[in-house]
Amino acid sequence: MKISYHGHSIVKILTGGKTILIDPFITGNELTDLDAASEKPDYIILTHAHGDHVGDTVPLAKENGSLVIANADLATYLGWQGAQTHGMNIGGAYEFDFGKVKFTQAFHGSGYATDDKQIIYGGMPAGVLIMAEGKTIYHAGDTGLFSDMKLIAERHPIDLAFLPIGDNFTMGPEDAAIAAEFLQAKTVVPIHYNTFPPIKQDPEAFIGMLKRKNGKVLHPGESMEL
């Protein structure tokens, strides 16, 4: 399984001959190395409805026939925009042809801002567990620190965790380091930082805070094997 990071919260997973894109905020993202016109995802997984996570989902899904996996409310809305969707909700899991996806809780907002300055209810924000090839990946989405991360780890031992560190909108580095302790993942990768001025952070400083010395910074375009 190949996993790559592409700026902000974008993660790409190649597994079982399928390409999965998480939170594909490509257009307007100055940190990403991706070109939306070149991406051909089989699946798109969304953690919540904010524009810097939904991003290019609808055009990507319509162009490539991608299946969009999102919370049920957001999936319904995106379906009205022409995307093929599979709605889920927190606590629920579903087996896809590449593996299992389970939505976990996250503490954040989830309104979708339209071009005509309306805020559409976007359902509950979530984290996502992806279980494939005998490995478990946890993408925390946008969230603050919460103690039930310990329970997530007990139920689903995590090989790789993507944790937001930007502060202001999500956990900052200090809280994310505590989250890493709660989750006990084999490897922790920071996300959701440096895209906008309020979330400027030093990812290497965050790595230095981790007690288990299990952090890894992936710069946009860099990948790892799991």
Image: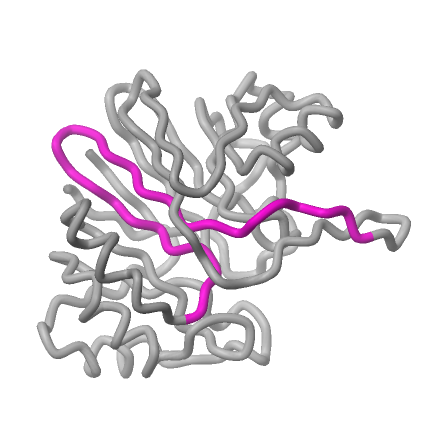
* x 53%, y 52%: residue: 125
Q: By what rule are the colours in the image chosen?
A: one colour
Q: Is residue 90 magenta?
A: no
Question: Relative to 165, is 30 on the left or the right?
Answer: right
* x 15%, y 38%: residue: 135
Q: Is residue 121 magenta?
A: yes
* x 66%, y 30%: residue: 59
> Looking at the picture, does residue 42 appear above or below residue 212?
above
Instruction: From the top left corner, tell me how far across and down residue 213 is, in percent.
Output: 10, 73
Specify start and end residues of the magenta stretch as a single range: 119-144
Pick whichever, 60 or 169, lies toward us: 169
Instruction: From the top left corner, tell me how far across and down residue 55 is, in percent.
Output: 62, 45
**Res 156 quadrant in image:** top left
* x 37%, y 40%: residue: 12
Tell me the quarter of the image containing the C terminus. Answer: top left
> Looking at the picture, does residue 62 appear above or below residue 223?
above
